[in-house]
Image (spheres, rainbow, N blue to C red):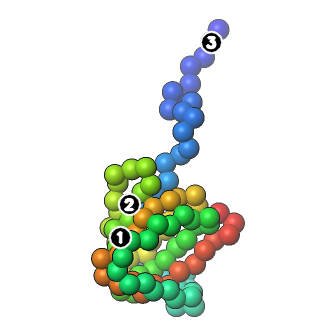
Amino acid sequence: MATSSNPDAMETDAPTLSITVERNPPESRLLELGIKSWPKWGCPPGKFPLKYDAEETCYLLKGRVKAYMKGSSECVEFGAGDLVVFPKGLSCTWDVLVAVDKHYKFDPSS
């Protein structure tokens, strides 16, 4: 007797990767993560294609970005005060609307 399974589970496409944005996390969360000890990075306005070889978590001190996922019309917006997680394997283009200054951390085990 044949059994059926969830047809979605049989898809051969890679799982959809998505950008997670936590808007204005409380100071206690930032302290718990140790964000102030993370390296800083900044960039001027412009468009930057990015491919994440490891999961990146970043906290934007200033700036405004629209991230366009590769192969999708989906856009995720984030800016100053947002805690953002980019999963390993994600490809996107950052459209930096306002110059960015951020703390960041890569998780090599992801």
Q: Are marks 2 and 1 in contact (CB under 8 Å)?
A: yes
* Earlier sequence position, callout 1 versus callout 3: 3
Give amino acid for label 2.
Tyr
Farthest-out residue, top: 1
Say which residue label 1 marks: 95
Q: Is residue 27 visible?
A: no
Q: At 43% across and 49% down in the image, what residue appears?
A: 71
What is the secondary structure assignment of the residue under circle 2? Answer: strand
Q: Where is residue 83 in the image (x, y as percent from the top left)?
A: 43, 75
Whole-angstrom CA distance, mark 2 to mark 1, is 8 Å
Instruction: Depth check: give the residue in front, 36 or 30.
Output: 36
Q: Is residue 56 visible?
A: yes
Whole-angstrom CA distance, mark 1 to mark 3, is 50 Å
Nearer the observer: mark 3 or 2; the answer is 2
Q: At 57% across and 88% down in the image, what residue appears?
A: 39
Farthest-out residue, bottom: 37
The image shows residue 82, relative to residue 11, as above or below, that is below
Counting other residues with Cα less than 10 Å from the Cα at mark 1, is it few (<14), some (14-19), or many (20 or more)?
some
Q: At 56% across and 25% down in the image, what residue appears?
A: 5
Instruction: Depth check: give the residue in front, 83 or 51.
Output: 51
Say which residue label 3 marks: 2
What is the secondary structure assignment of the residue under circle 1? Answer: strand
Q: In this view, does 71 lie to the left or right of 1?
A: left
The image shows residue 53, relative to residue 38, as above or below, that is above
Say which residue label 2 marks: 68
Location of the C terminus (image quadrant): bottom right
Give amino acid for label 1.
Asp
Q: Where is residue 29 in the image (x, y as percent from the top left)?
A: 47, 80
Q: Where is residue 109 in the image (x, y as percent from the top left)?
A: 69, 66
